[in-house]
Amino acid sequence: GENVEQHPSTLSVQEGDSAVIKCTYSDSASNYFPWYKQELGKGPQLIIDIRSNVGEKKDQRIAVTLNKTAKHFSLHITETQPEDSAVYFCAASKAGGYQKVTFGIGTKLQVIP
Amino acid sequence: DVKVTQSSRYLVKRTGEKVFLECVQDMDHENMFWYRQDPGLGLRLIYFSYDVKMKEKGDIPEGYSVSREKKERFSLILESASTNQTSMYLCASTSDSPLHFGNGTRLTVT
């Protein structure tokens, strides 16, 4: 089955700096890679996703890159703000709602004002 | 907006009790999932369902069962709760991608 490794497990950055979280996956058949943000007391929420036919996707201060050959993908947050503090999860699956989604262990991001 | 509602925010149960965790979604999604979340282990899939009365085992189904009698409702059942089932339980639904999660049920088994 799929295995997703995520690092670092914790990350502290100064407000305004950039944060990068990296993930690798094992199953070359995976073609959908979402990123979720989990705030305290809430369930994870999708913040950005990328499909395997795209190498990079950007949404304001958030970007995700995908290297299919190396089987790794990364989340980049620029100009970090205190409200970016949360736990971030990467995940991998085949596209389609009935597919199993495999998650990384999560990264706790702390943005220091 | 999709709403996934988990009936209890916190639950405390005793070892050996039968426990029901309920989840309801309001977007007519075919697919529903139960995950448990533990520190250092991320989210692990327990069971999922792609249609009424259908179920599939996830990665850690032992000690759990599920029920899906109606499209909008997916129940997780702990037949005989044990202390190692103390965890945060997250329900999710989707029609395609991505998953939409509830806010979780924190279950403590004493």
Image (spheres, coloured by chain):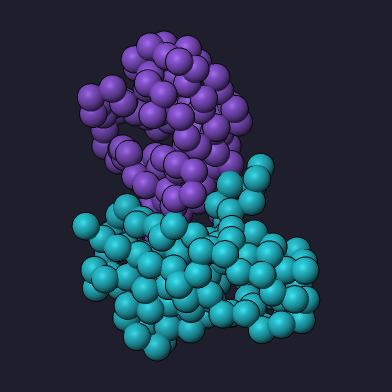
Answer left or right for B19 relative to B105.
Answer: right
Q: Quadrant of residue B4?
A: bottom left
Judge by depth and name the residue closer to the eye, A34 or B3: B3
Residue B60 shows in the view:
no
Give the chain ID for the purple colour: A
Residue B62 x/y as whole percent:
68, 72
Point 41% across, 60% down: residue: B102
Vertical side of A66 occupied by B26: above or below: below
Residue A97 x/y as whole percent:
33, 61
Point 49% across, 49% down: residue: A41
Judge by depth and name the residue closer to the eye, A69 or B60: B60
Vertical side of A54 occupied by B38: above or below: below
Point 32% across, 52% down: residue: B98
Q: Quadrant of residue B79?
A: bottom right
Which tint is chain B?
A: cyan
Residue B94 x/y as whole percent:
31, 62
Q: Quadrant of the C terminus of chain B?
A: bottom right
